[in-house]
Amino acid sequence: MADDVPVVGQPSGTVTLVFTDIEGSTRLLQALGRDAYLAALDDQRRIVRAACARHDGYEVDTAGDGFFYAFASAGEAVAAVEEAMAALKGKMIRVRAGIHTGEPRVDPPKYVGQEVHKAARIMGAGHGGQVLLSQSTRGLVDGLEVRDLGDHRLKDFDEPVRLFQLGRVEFPPLKTLSNTNLPVPGSSFVGRERELADVTSLLRNGGGRLVTLAGPGGSGKTRLAIEAATEVIGDYPDGVRLSKKEMRPYEARLERSAILPKYDITIKPKATGR
């Protein structure tokens, strides 16, 4: 393992999982430049690894700017994250963390199962400098100063998850589906990653205040729109809302425009019942 960090055996049974990553890493890279960013990234890695090693953390994985750690003790996991966040305070890089306790299946050297995905989703709901805990972790550690953030809907999970914030600092609303009225799809979104990336890029990078998805009925426009809206919830402090107003008048104007003929797209009239 890098940085001369002692190797810890992989925990099994009830395990506390920790995910971390850097908020706005792409923007930070652009602002600092490659060399300065790499130096800051190395510093962050050293701090997180050292803190986790002191509390017997098992490094499951690292990818880019984030870590995935596992701990046999929930208390040690929280202590490691607290120590790392304190050491990172005031630095250019702002790290967020999610902590969840469960019983993932061991698949050496990693873990698999819903508990892993839940821990990652919890981390993804936070902001730079924020540490989020699941109720299962909160219940195992006494004496913590936490804020009860209530129940939140997480992507790909049917039931709401109770979340707690470590510390009393104020942060913007969490990046969860609770900050929206978007429906939870009944199936996974597979095979349209490039389209999704194109739409979210337009929304995030100045493509305009309105992005229109045009196509024949049944081509998956609504599903793509919901998935894209879900991805950018955290970019809008007031949330993301689904409007179910009648769209046929807009479709009629679109049909008369030059857009649809150019791509050989037609809109079929709605069937009318008696």
Image (cartoon, grey):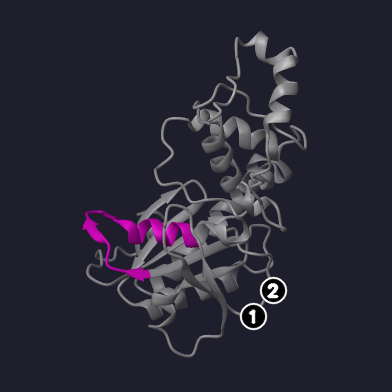
Give the residue drawn at x 67%, y 9%.
262
Q: Which mark is residue 168?
A: 1
Quick check: is 115 in the magenta stretch?
Answer: yes
Q: Are marks 2 and 1 in contact (CB under 8 Å)?
A: yes
At which x and y percent is residue 3? 42, 57
Q: Nearest the camera: 55 or 135?
A: 135
Element type at marker 1?
A: loop
Give the residue drawn at x 27%, y 62%.
104
Does residue 59 appear anywhere in the picture? no
Quick check: is 114 in the magenta stretch?
Answer: yes
Residue assigned mark 2: 170
Location of the N terminus by quadrant is bottom left
At which x and y percent is residue 109? 25, 54
Give the residue drawn at x 46%, y 46%.
185
Q: Nearest the camera: 271 or 205?
A: 271
Give the extent of the magenta segment: 101-122
